[in-house]
Image (tube, rainbow, N blue to C red):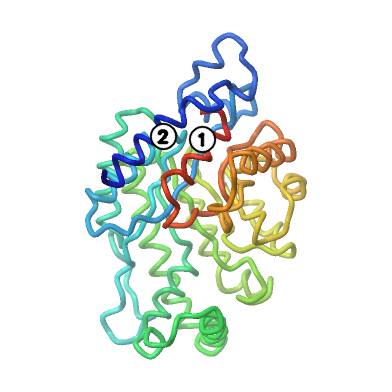
Amino acid sequence: MNRRTLISSLAAAAGTVLARPLFGTRSGLSQLSHKERVDRALRGEDLDRPPFTFYHHYKRPTAQLEATDHLDFHRAYETDIVKVMNDFDYPPSTTGKWYELKPLDSPYPDQLATLKYVRDGLNGDAYFIDTIYGPYMTAMLLYQSQPQLAALPKSEEAQDEQIKSLHEFQQQNPEGWHTALEAITQSTINHIQHAKKIGASGALVSVFNAESKFGSVEDYRKYTRPYDKRVFDALADTRLTVLHLHYLERPYIDLFKDFPAPVIQYSVKTSGIAISEIRQHYSQPILGGVDEIDYRKLTVSDIRRQWTEAREQAGAKYIAAPGCSVPNDSTPDELARFPQALGI
């Protein structure tokens, strides 16, 4: 039995467990479609259950294989939103200096092809969104790809040193930094326009550096925020764009209030910040609450408790999800626990 067949069979079996809705069963609510459920959550209306999504990386070599894996995952686990992972690399500089970049029509043509395949495969069954790294994260990946850094051992300590080195580059070569960020930002915006034409309902945009190890709050304002804001402005007319705060510390919380993001996501696990605290600062729907770090250890009861507590703190505008992607080596049985925890 191959992985795809195993996923489908386990998910089918999971449908017989905890099948009753955990929310209201008022007439009509138990028949909500994926899109109806999401739309009602965005407006804070009554639901049969919260909409949910989760995801991991596939890292497949072609757009068609990427799309097939995303569609199989959605059908196996009945996700309400299909977040299309972007596992394709931003093109490096050709000059030998990582920061000497030019704007591109799209840095991710294979991702655009994946979005088309997903759109056609879904045939309107659910909303799908793109995945975009914020300009800082893209710059960091390009910086780390330099031969002298790429050859270093992979460790948390090594990454911390690279983050420190990149911060020094910002301070010592601000012209080079802003040249790179300008090109990356414009290329990202160009990509966004293509993705919207394809039919994506927005994008999850990962803001990577809202934490002091990347620099102070003032550093974020100076070196990154203007570029992040432009990316979100390009997505302002979308239904489901997600402000994903990959790292988050309290001093940075209020920096994003003017970002036109319909949904906000962060990791309760890694930040230590309760959803009730974020709700005091942001009124839009919150996506998250489930532990993505130790996801493989969670039981169905653990996941149910986590999303229930998150929903109580977030209120009606809530979408159940982990704080980020779950481990890529999660087994089909482990993955099936999430929909089970929602009564699917």
Q: Do the residues labelled 1 and 2 touch (CB within 8 Å)?
A: yes
From the image, which quarter does the N terminus lie in? top left
Residue 249: give x, y in percent of width and height.
Answer: 70, 64
In the figure, is residue 248 to the left or right of 122? right
Residue receiving disc 2: 11
Q: Name the mark nearer the viewer: 1 or 2.
A: 2
Q: What element carries label 1?
A: helix
- 323 or 340: which is nearer to us? 340
Residue 342: give x, y in percent of width and height.
Answer: 57, 32
Q: Residue at x 30, y 29 (%)?
A: 123
In the figure, is residue 3 to the left or right of 290? left
Question: Toward which corner of the image does residue 117 lie, by quadrant?
Answer: top left
For marks 1 and 2, give the CA distance: 9 Å
Is residue 185 positioned above or below 266 on the image?
below
Q: Is mark 2 on a helix, strand or loop?
A: helix
Q: Which residue is drawn at 27% across and 35% down?
A: 121
Residue receiving disc 1: 339
In the figure, is residue 260 to the left or right of 107? right
* Three-letter amino acid code of the residue under disc 2: Ala
Residue 225: give x, y in percent of width and height.
Answer: 58, 65
Q: Which residue is drawn at 46% across and 31% down?
A: 14
Which residue lies most toward the top here? Answer: 27
* Three-letter amino acid code of the residue under disc 1: Pro
- 78 or 329: which is nearer to us? 329
